[in-house]
Every structure is written in C-alpha cells, then in structure tokens.
Image (cartoon, grey):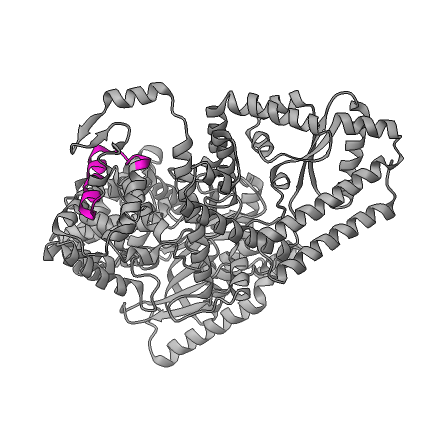
C-alpha cells in the first residue's frame, strides 16, 4: 500500500515529537547514553509501526510467510541500541528466500515511506549468503554486523545469519577481519597515536567514538564479545581502562547529542563556534590565565587522548602477527643489558621486567637503548614502564638519569617516536614535570591546528627530519650542527610557558633555566637554552613581518644572537615551529624569506662587512640574470640590466628567482612611460595565481596598491599575499598572490585576461573600483560571519625603528575587502606605501605596511601618529560591523 499525505505527515510529526522528548530528557539532566537509548527505542517503535502499517492490508498468509522467512535486523549504531537525534537508522532486511517478492516489495515501500517522513534509513535487503559475501568484501558492512540485533521476524533466520557471520567472516579469517577493522582507522592516526586537531570530528577523530567502536569490533573477533564489561570479564581490558572508556563514551555521546540538537542535523564537527557555545552553556568562565573554552577543550582532549592510548594498546595485544615474523624476530634479535631483547622492538622477559622498571634511571636506560637501536619498546614493556612511573615517588632526576635523557636526545632519526612513547608512558613528565601542564592544552585561535603538546611533538619530528619544502639551507645547517641534543631539548621546551597570564616566552625562559640546572647542563648550554626559548618567535617575526633586508634590522638581530651557533639553532627551531603549527602554514615563500634573513645575519656574525656582502650578492644576481637575458634577449644592453638591478630594493630579490627577475626586466625594457602591463601565472602547488603589475606611468603608480586590491576584491579574489617594489627610477613592480573563488581549479586564460584588463583600466582611471563592484556583485551571495570569529582587530604603529619609514601593522579576521579597505584608508591619509607584507593564514591576516609621507619624509609627531592610528581603528571597526558584507 502507498500511504496518504496525512499518514506520512503523522509519521513525520511523531518523529518530531520523539526528538523533542529526547531533548526534554537531555535538558533535564539525563546522561547522554540514556538519552541515546531512549531515542533508539523510540525510533525503533516508529519504524515497526510503519512496517506494521505497510503489512496492514497484506493477507494473513503472506504476513505469516514474511514472519517465518524474513527479518528486520538493527545493525551499526541502531544495533548497539544508541542513536543520536539525527543519526541514520541502520536496518538490514534479511530475506530468507521463500517470500522474496513480497518481502522486497514491502521493504521498498518501507524505505520510501521513511524517507518521506524524514526518518533517514540506512537500509538494504540481502539474503544470508549475500550478507556473508558482502561482509567479506566490505569491512564497513562487516563491522556493522557485529552489532546486529533482531527487531522483527524470524529468529531462526537471524540466528543463522549470526552463526554464518561468526564462522565464515570472523573466525575463519580472524586476523584479516581485525586488520580490516584497523585499516579503516589508521588514516586518522599519526604512527598509531592520537592527533589532537583543534576542530575535531567527535565521531571519526582519533580517540573519538569510532575508536570505542573499534575496541568492540576487535573484541568481538578476538574474544567473542563486544561490550566493554564483557571484555573486562574475559581479561581483555583491565578495570582502570574500562572506567576510562565508559566515562569517555558518556562524555562523547552527550557532546554528540548536544551538537545534533543545536544544529538540527547530524553534525559531528566540534567547531570553534560550537566550542564557544558549549563552554558558555556549561559555565566555563574565562580566568586571567586561560579562557573558559580552552579549559573545556582540555577536558575533551584528556578523554580522547586516553581513549586513543587504550585503543592503540588494545590493538597491539590482539593483533595477530604472522608466525614467520615472530620466528624472524627471535632469530635476528640479540640480548642487551642482560634481560632485554632487541629485535623488531626492544622487549623484556617477564622475569626481568621488575629490574628494568624499578626506578626512573632504569626506565631512561631502556629508552636510551631504544633510541640508539632505532626501535620502540614492545607494548608489554611500554605498559610496564607506564605502570611503574605512576607508582614511583616524585623525586628530582639523578645525574645518571639526566645523562641518559640527554643521550636519548642525540638520536635524531628515532627521537620523534621515542618521545611520543615517553609522553604516552608519562616518563617525559617524570623528567620534565612542566610538560604535564601543556598536555591537551589548546589555544583558541584560528592559527593553531593542534594542542600545545601535539604541536611540540610534531616540531620535534620536523626538526629531526626537515621535509623537502623546508629548503636545502636549513637541512644543511641542521646536519652540520654539533649540539643537536640541546636543539632538541629547546624544541621540547619552546612552548612550555604557555597557559600562564604572562608572555609564554618569558615564562619559558625561566623554566628553561630550571630545566637546564636540573639536567646538570654546563652554564654555557643553559644560557643558550634560555636564549632560544626566550627569542624563539623573533626570527619569524622579522622575516615575515619586517623588512629583513634592512641593514639595521640585520645587525640588531645578529647582535642579539651573539654567536653563529645560536643563530643556526634559532633558524632550525623557527622553521620547525612554524611548520608544526599545521597544514598550510609553511610555504616556499616563507622558506625564501627566512633563509635570506639567516644568510644576512650569518654574514654579520662571521665578521664580514654587510655592505660588501650585498655588493657581491648583487654582482652574482646581475651575472646570473645577465646570462639568461644574453641568451634569450641579446638586444638588451648589459649595462642597462646592471642599472635596473641596482635600482631595485634588496627585498625584491628575496622573493624573486633569477628566471622571474629576467622576465620582469624583459617587460620593463619594452614598457612605455604610459602603459600598464599585467602578467599572470598559475601556481598549482598553492592553487593560486600570481598577478604581476608593471608601470612607469606616475599617475597610474599613484595609489596603485589600494586600487589593485580593490579590483581583486571586486572580482571575488582571496588575496593571500602582496608585495610592492618600486625602482629608483619610479617603475612599479607589484605582485599579488590570489585564489580565485569563482573557480575550483586553475582559472582559464580568459578569466586571467579579464582580471588583467580590469587592473589596467583601474590604474589608468578608465573605471572606478565602485563601478567594478556594481558590475560584479552577485546578489544573494553575502555570507554570514562564522560564529566564533571574534578576534579583536589591532593596529600597531612603530615610527622609531627606522629613520625614514614608519611601520603600520594590522591584525584582523580575514574577510573579503579587508585589504582594500585598509589600503584605501592609508591612501586617504596621504601616506605612500613603500613596502607591504601581506600574509593570510586560515581566517586571519597580518598586514604590515612600511609607509612615509607623500613627499617622502618620515611620519613623525604624536598628533600625526595618533591620527593614523585612530583613523585606521575607526575604519576597521566600521568594516567589521557592516562594510565587510558588501564585499562578500
């Protein structure tokens, strides 16, 4: 039968009432699992009522056949008996074969009716042999059958399915089943351990609900039972782990229900906006040292980190290794320290376990052997060390233990994994008690992807094995470094001061001194450690936000470093720190900027005169570019090339390869005094387009920066970075890296040509920015401000660092039109922009402008500086309150 609109509406209304009742129960303080159980039972009741209504007009004989030869089975989350408000209802219609046509017809009507009623079913119809075959080929379906539960129909048929599934899918291929379950989770892990992303998916993120499910699936295969309590009775989980898992299951289920109700959909993403809402809802208030939302997320990460650790250990205990691998491990291994066995891992006999875990020194000695062998401790050894550390009395590290720890830090290749193991066993906390504070500590801003401890461990992984895009220079510097263990200790400590009211660099500096003394380091190394932690942000700050080609800036920083060794360590630390922030934070541009700055500072510290270095560098560039142009454009005079290069600012060469410099000079050579030329290049590795703008026209050059930003904004471009370069002759070479929001991949040539024409028209005053906005506005496309985008914009002005230039820094949430609004305001203040460094990351930008008065004089005087600051702050406030919507 087909249901009438009224009947479907009745089902839909009942679904609304079920969700409303669940919400009332949840708001009244019911635990998450109790609410999920109520929702599941209520949804099942609705499903069965719809099914019975479908069978209402079916003859009794047919219904009887369906009952004997068909079944409705709850699988997945529905089979577990827990549903969140907007979760799919996972059903398997089991066809016994003797009522197939009628059963499948009823199932089809059932599925359509559920969809019409907004009850989204995950439904399929299969026979028992089909279930077995599909489960062998589809691990996701196989794992859902672990939770199978009969809702309606033939129990013998259902039990036949369970027997066949256990025997043919699980028992006969136990190792394969377990491996397939694990494989589905490995992409969420880093080397088998937790990844603490700051906007996690609470279902699929490491340590989330899916890990709890994984324990059930592996437990079912290895021990014949799936629920946590039964696994404890089987000896597969200990009492402490069961308590942790149950608490986490309740915490995550409650959180998931909250997200579903708040968003009125199956939303599993714990976004920053949701974090703010729930922190306020649960009464997490800000304190002087930490925001309430950060404490909320620290609680979340404590749960997920523990779940991830238990899951990893549970996998290790139940993963079946091939016999050949076990024999090989025994044959190729050797004894060490009397009771340790070094093979594929470092292991210990049960008899010797007490002696190698009796105190911190003994445990560190084991880890030193692991590091020197490039191996991890076996799981049982790791678990024994973790239990032993928890029972050891708190005491200062001994000189021997400190020596073992510093030895561990020497082994770069093995160090990242060794430190992760030491963190998981809490041995690292025993050596460095300050590490406990940064565990699961988050920073609520769009810049950071990971908690402080995860960021720290990632930075260690990067510094010991710099990826190719870090640049060959930093790789070479690291390889030639003498005291690598001191650098590695610095990386561990560089953010150790976070979570306090005071600047974390200053707090970290004091902690570094304490740690150095506790580890019995020489005074000179303590001073270096102290320096590196105190100034670990300075090099990136100058390279990415200041004119790092300015001689005064270079000399000041070189004098701060004092020695080449400190400069080298700070360089390596900076690259690792920035890269470890998260995906997309490092780029070729950043590698060039910081590498150039390092080079210049090293020249000063090596005793060479900086002016001589720049002259030699310019000669080298001139020869390289001259050679390129001599071959491709012999008509361009070499003395003209030299004159043009000497007239370009030093900063230009830090961002421009020789081939690009040659291409720029080709354009300048044929450029008339009136025209504007725009050249565009698509860069696939960043999925961005670089537009380079050239002109000698003084009228076009006047205010060109804000006009170009306006054109790009009007044409719906996201501006990623921008650079301004003006030769001594007044020729402009500006560069904008943008992402075209109208195209998913490479913008076609016609699009880039139209952007170039718009730039030319705007600079030559043939069109206005306002006209471009009117022509290109897309009605109905305005965006809403994401909840949680609440960073306060800041304007900082520095007129004392340079004699001729004033630095204006703008820090704000990134929105379309921001750069245009700022640059137009600067232009209206009658300021000339000499250099701009625009950097966009995630949802935030830092725009740095080097400006002077229109007549070239230095911006001075409190009244003038206050005018600039107040004007820009007012413009930013106006933009953030309403104007940003007009650019969306």
The percent position of residue 821, horizontal first and vertical second, equals: 51, 64
Which is more toward the observer, 235 or 315?
A: 235
Left/right of residue 62 with respect to residue 806 in the rendered view: right
Residue 816 visible, this angle: no
Residue 625 within the segment the image draws in magenta: no
Given the current orientation, which residue lies at the most extreme bottom position?
863
Which stretch is magenta? Answer: 358-380
Q: Residue 151 at x, y = what percent?
A: 70, 37
Quadrant (top left/top right/bottom left/bottom right) for the N terminus:
top right
Q: Nearer the viewer, residue 45 or 425?
A: 45
Where does the C terminus fall, quadrant-wise?
Answer: bottom right
Which residue is at 34% across, 73% downward?
859
Residue 377 inside the magenta-drawn segment: yes
- Where residue 449 sits: x, y (%)? 42, 51
Q: Main secondary structure of the magenta part?
A: helix
The residue that appears at 17% across and 53% down in the rendered structure is: 397
Residue 248 position within the rendered picture, expressed as x and y whole percent measured from the top left = 48, 50
């Amino acid at each position: 039968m087909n249901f009438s609109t009224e009947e479907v509406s009745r089902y839909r209304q009942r679904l609304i009432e079920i969700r409303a009742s669940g919400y009332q129960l949840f708001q009244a303080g019911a635990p998450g699992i109790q609410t999920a159980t109520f929702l599941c039972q209520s949804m099942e009741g609705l499903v069965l009522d719809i099914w019975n209504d479908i069978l209402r007009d079916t003859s009794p004989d047919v219904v009887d056949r369906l009952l004997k030869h068909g079944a409705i089975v709850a699988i997945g989350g529905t089979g577990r008996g827990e549903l969140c408000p907007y979760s799919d209802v996972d059903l398997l219609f089991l066809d016994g074969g003797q009522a197939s046509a009628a059963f499948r017809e009823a199932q089809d009507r059932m599925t359509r009716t559920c969809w019409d009623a907004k009850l989204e079913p995950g439904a399929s119809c299969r026979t028992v042999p089909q279930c077995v075959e599909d489960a062998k080929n589809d691990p996701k379906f196989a794992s859902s059958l672990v939770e199978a539960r009969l809702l309606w129909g033939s129990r013998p048929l259902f039990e036949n399915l369970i027997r066949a599934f256990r025997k043919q899918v699980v028992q006969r291929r136990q190792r394969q089943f377990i491996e397939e379950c694990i494989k589905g989770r490995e992409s969420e892990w880093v080397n088998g351990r937790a990844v603490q992303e700051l906007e996690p998916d609470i279902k699929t993120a490491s340590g989330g609900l899916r890990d709890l499910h994984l324990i059930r699936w592996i437990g079912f295969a290895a021990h014949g039972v799936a629920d946590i309590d039964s696994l404890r009775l089987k000896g597969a989980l200990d009492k402490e782990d069961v308590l942790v898992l149950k608490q986490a299951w309740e915490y995550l289920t409650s959180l998931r229900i909250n997200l579903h109700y708040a968003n009125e959909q199956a939303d599993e993403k714990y976004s920053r906006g949701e974090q703010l809402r729930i922190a306020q809802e649960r009464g997490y208030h800000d304190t002087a040292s930490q925001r309430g939302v950060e404490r909320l997320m620290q609680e979340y990460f404590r749960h997920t980190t523990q779940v991830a650790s238990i899951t990893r250990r549970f996998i290790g205990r139940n993963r079946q290794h091939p016999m050949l691998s076990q024999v090989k491990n025994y044959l190729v291994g050797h004894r060490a320290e009397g009771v340790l066995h070094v093979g594929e891992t470092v292991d210990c006999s049960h008899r010797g376990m007490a002696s190698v875990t009796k105190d911190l020194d003994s445990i560190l000695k084991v880890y030193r052997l692991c590091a020197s062998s490039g191996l991890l401790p076996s799981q049982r050894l790791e678990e024994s060390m973790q239990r032993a550390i928890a029972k050891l009395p708190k005491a200062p590290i001994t000189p021997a233990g400190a020596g073992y720890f510093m030895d561990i830090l020497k082994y770069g290749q093995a160090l990242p994994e060794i430190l992760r193991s030491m963190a998981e066993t809490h041995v690292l906390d025993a050596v460095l008690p300050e590490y406990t504070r940064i565990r699961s500590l988050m920073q609520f801003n769009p810049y950071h992807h990971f908690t402080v401890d995860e960021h720290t461990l990632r930075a260690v992984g990067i510094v010991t094995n710099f990826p190719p895009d870090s640049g060959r220079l930093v790789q070479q510097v690291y390889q030639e470094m003498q005291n690598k263990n001191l650098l590695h200790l610095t990386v561990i400590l560089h953010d150790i001061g976070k979570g306090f009211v005071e600047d974390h660099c200053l707090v970290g500096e004091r902690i570094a001194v304490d740690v150095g003394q506790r580890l019995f380091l020489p005074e000179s190394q303590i001073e270096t450690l102290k320096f590196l932690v105190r100034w670990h942000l300075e090099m990136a700050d100058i390279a990415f936000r200041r004119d790092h080609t300015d001689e005064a800036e270079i000399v000041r920083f070189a004098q701060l470093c004092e020695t080449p060794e400190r400069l080298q360590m700070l360089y390596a630390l900076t690259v690792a720190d920035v890269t470890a922030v998260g995906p997309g934070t490092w780029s070729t541009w950043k590698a060039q900027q910081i590498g150039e700055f390092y080079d210049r500072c090293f020249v000063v510290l090596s005793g060479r005169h900086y002016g001589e270095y720049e002259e030699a560098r310019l000669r080298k560039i001139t020869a390289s570019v001259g050679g390129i142009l001599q071959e491709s454009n012999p008509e361009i005079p070499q003395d003209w090339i030299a004159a043009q290069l000497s007239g370009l600012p030093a900063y230009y060469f830090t961002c421009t390869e020789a081939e690009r410099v040659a291409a720029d000079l080709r354009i300048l050579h044929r450029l008339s005094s009136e025209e504007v030329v725009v050249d565009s290049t698509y860069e696939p590795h960043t999925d961005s387009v670089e537009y380079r703008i050239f002109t000698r026209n003084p009228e076009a050059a006047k205010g060109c920066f804000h006009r170009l930003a306006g054109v790009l904004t009007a044409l719906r471009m996201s501006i990623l970075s921008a650079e301004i370069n003006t030769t001594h002759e007044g020729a402009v070479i500006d560069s904008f890296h943008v992402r075209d929001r109208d195209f998913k991949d490479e913008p076609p040539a016609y699009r880039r040509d139209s952007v170039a024409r718009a730039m030319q028209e705007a600079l030559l005053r043939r069109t206005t920015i306002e006209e471009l906005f009117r022509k290109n506005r897309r009605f109905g496309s305005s965006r809403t401000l994401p909840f949680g985008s609440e960073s306060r914009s800041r304007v900082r002005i520095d007129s004392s660092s340079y004699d001729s230039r004033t630095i204006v820094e703008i820090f704000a949430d990134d929105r379309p039109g921001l750069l245009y609004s700022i640059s137009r305001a600067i232009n209206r203040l009658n300021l000339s922009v000499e250099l701009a460094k625009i950097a966009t990351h995630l949802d935030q930008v830092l725009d740095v402008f080097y400006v002077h008065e229109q007549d070239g004089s230095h911006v001075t005087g409190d009244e003038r500086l206050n005018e600039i600051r107040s004007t820009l702050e007012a413009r930013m406030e106006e933009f953030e309150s309403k104007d940003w919507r007009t650019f969306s």
